[in-house]
Image (cartoon, rainbow, N blue to C red):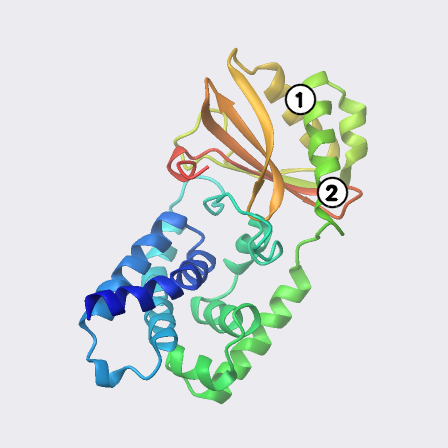
């Protein structure tokens, strides 16, 4: 029986991790949630389980909702901007719904709005299924979905038309920073560009406040590169669905820089320096 349970669970594990990661913005916490779901799957009465997929997705969703109650309180005292834990990805993922910018936007929803939106819009569950999974009336779930859609649409991140167009800006950004080309870098940035850095109080040099405007952001990054110590290096890798900059110090990942672009200009820069969030890169 244990072998059969494991086989069913492993079949659905990628989906469970995907739900938990988008809900929480943390790969480590998502893995913990999925492990707890495995324990509950093992102990669940078999006659109470009509669908393994539905049961496991419901357990993961409700565990995430419970987890977010405490996580929200912790993030209120977080040092500086909070950004999600970055993860390496491949072409199989939907780049928009796993992007760093979109995961940040999801943080502005209430936990249950986030769950309803993700389950219906990203994972394709029906309104009736979502109602069962979050434990609310279907009419209430429809209203939650409507509010979430309106909120996200008004603030939706910009996305490049292709990964190739996005990567051209990533490599151009890196080249301008390394060469100290201030004017060239400013031309790549939108006038209202904003740069965030997440050090969590554990990374030297991470700003605790966002930096706004093309001139200020360009000077910030060129200044950072000028001060870089021997042993720094950067490469372009796919992170959270898009080409991103992975910066290493003596071979150890020090920073992951995610750019929000429309394929022509850079509108947002999110740098994740908190060492607790870089173990999976």
Dividing the picture into quarters, in which one does residue 191 lie?
top right
Nearest to the observer: residue 24 or residue 93: 93
The residue depicted at 33 percent of the width and 69 percent of the height is: 8
Residue position for label 1: 222
| Distance between the alpha carbons at the discs numbered 2 and 1 | 24 Å
Question: In x, y percent, where is residue 224?
Answer: 59, 21
- Locate the N terminus and report the quarter of the image it occupies: bottom left
Using a 10 Å C-alpha cutoff, classify the residue at mark 2 as few (fewer than 14 neighbours), some (14 to 19) or many (20 or more). few
Discs 2, 1 touching: Cβ within 8 Å: no
Image position of 258 with respect to 21: above or below? above
Name the mark on residue 164: 2
Residue visible at 28% across and 81% down? 49
Q: Which of marks 2 and 1 is nearer the N terminus?
A: 2
* Residue at the (47%, 40%) spot, across then down: 80
Q: Say few, some or many: other residues with alpha carbon within 10 Å of mark 1 (under 14 / 14 to 19 / 20 or more).
A: many
> Going 72% across and 17% down the picture, which residue do you hit?
179
Q: Is mark 1 on a helix, strand or loop?
A: helix
Question: Could you tell whether 266 is left or right of 64 in the image?
Answer: right
Q: Is residue 18 above or below residue 151?
A: above
Element type at marker 2?
A: helix
From the viewer's side, name the closer residue of 118 and 218: 118
| Position of residue 280 in the picture relative to residue 168 (left or right) | left
The residue nearer to you, when weighing 7 against 281, is 7
User: Where residue 281 sits in the image (x, y, percent)?
Assistant: 46, 37
> Residue 144 — which label?
none
**Residue 3 position in % (x across, y down):** 23, 65
* Quarter of the view holding residue 167: top right
């Amino acid at each position: 029986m244990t072998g059969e349970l494991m086989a069913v669970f492993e079949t659905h594990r990628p989906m469970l991790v995907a739900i938990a990661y988008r809900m929480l913005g943390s790969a480590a916490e998502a893995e913990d949630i999925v492990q707890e779901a495995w324990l509950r799957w093992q102990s669940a009465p078999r006659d109470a389980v009509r669908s393994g997929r539905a049961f496991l997705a419901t357990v993961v969703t409700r565990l995430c909702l419970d987890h977010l109650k405490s996580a929200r309180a912790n993030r209120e005292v977080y040092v500086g901007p909070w950004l999600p834990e970055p993860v390496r990805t491949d072409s199989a993922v939907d780049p928009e719904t796993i992007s760093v910018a979109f995961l940040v936007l999801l943080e502005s929803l209430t936990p249950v709005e986030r769950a309803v939106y993700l389950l219906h819009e990203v994972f394709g569950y029906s309104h009736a299924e979502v109602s069962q999974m979050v434990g609310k009336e279907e009419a209430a779930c429809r209203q939650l979905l409507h509010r979430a859609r309106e909120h996200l649409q008004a603030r939706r991140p910009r996305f490049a038309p292709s990964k190739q167009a996005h990567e051209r800006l990533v490599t151009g950004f890196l080249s301008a920073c390394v060469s100290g080309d201030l004017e060239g870098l400013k031309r790549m940035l939108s006038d209202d560009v904003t740069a965030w850095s997440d050090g969590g109080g554990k990374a030297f040099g991470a700003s605790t406040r966002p930096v706004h405007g093309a001139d200020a952001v360009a000077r910030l990054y060129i200044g950072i590169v000028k001060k870089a110590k021997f042993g720094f290096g950067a490469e372009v890798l796919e992170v959270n669905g898009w080409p991103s900059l992975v910066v290493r110090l003596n071979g150890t990942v020090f920073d992951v820089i995610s750019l929000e672009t429309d394929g022509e200009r850079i509108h947002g820069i999110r740098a994740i320096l908190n060492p607790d969030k870089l173990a999976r890169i």
